[in-house]
Amino acid sequence: MNAPSAELLAWLDYRSKSIAMGHLALRHSMSWEDVPAMRVCFDDRLVIEGLATGFTNGAIEAAVIHARAVLEFLGLKAVKGSTTEIAELDIRRSHDDLGVEQFRGALKFTKERALSAYPGPREEAESALATVFYAANKGLAHATASFDRNSSQSHLLEVAFRGVPVLLLNAFYRPLGLVQPNYELTFRPRDV
């Protein structure tokens, strides 16, 4: 393919914004000692009351799925049976799967390029990306005793949620000469 379609660009923008929303939700949830109350208003009318996890859990889980889809689009996968390793996709699963390598000027992202983009330890970068696959495949796809939301996985997801948009920029937008849409969220910090 020569150029990405408007639909693909919208898909990547949507996924990037969903990852950003999950990142924001994860940072909030990691800061709480006790889960605060939540009130949701539409046009200043209260429509939902409950705990903040009513928002944060779903946003984090959606971000995991979107991050996994972006990583696969870039050409990365989990190493079967590992919670800490990633590898390069050998082949696409289906004939209609889109991958970055299908666009002139872009190549599948290698494991080496993905890990070298992270300014911290390589092992942490790889574990963070592997945690996305593990959380999507084991933690969310079915009930399992091996996924613990309260473990170090929260930190690794936070690293991954920061890193996946950077990988998308480096592997897709820059090589194709495209401007990455602004996916960062605007929010008002509040003293509570």
Image (cartoon, rainbow, N blue to C red):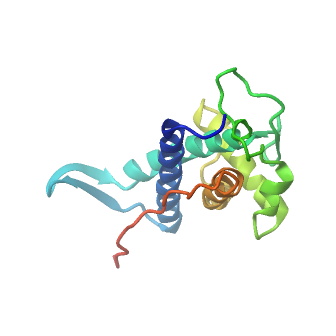
Q: Is residue 76 above or below residue 127?
A: above
> Which residue, as the protein is rendered here, is positioned at the far bottom?
191
Please give the name of the residue rendered at 69% of the width and 36% of the height, measured from the top-left corner: 99
Residue 70 image point, x, y percent: 63, 43
Instruction: Pick the residue in front: 63 or 6.
Output: 6
In the picture, measured across the screen, residue 21 lies left or right of residue 52, that is: right
Please give the name of the residue rendered at 32% of the width and 59% of the height, measured from the top-left corner: 37
Residue 183 image point, x, y percent: 49, 58
Number of labels in the image equals 0
In the picture, measured across the screen, residue 86 lies left or right of residue 147, that is: right
Please give the name of the residue rendered at 77% of the width and 45% of the height, measured from the top-left corner: 107
Q: For residue 5, what is the image quadrant?
A: top right
Instruction: Pick the residue in front: 89 or 58.
Output: 89
Residue 36 image point, x, y percent: 36, 62
The quadrant of the image that shows the N terminus is top right
Instruction: Pick the residue in front: 113 or 192.
Output: 113
Can residue 17 be seen? yes
In the picture, measured across the screen, residue 51 lies left or right of residue 18, that is: left
Q: Is residue 163 above or below residue 99?
A: below
Can residue 146 be seen? no
The quadrant of the image that shows the C terminus is bottom left
Please give the name of the residue rendered at 25% of the width and 51% of the height, measured from the top-left corner: 49
Residue 75 image point, x, y percent: 75, 40
In the picture, measured across the screen, residue 21 lies left or right of residue 42, that is: right
> Which residue, as the protein is rendered here, is positioned at the far top?
95
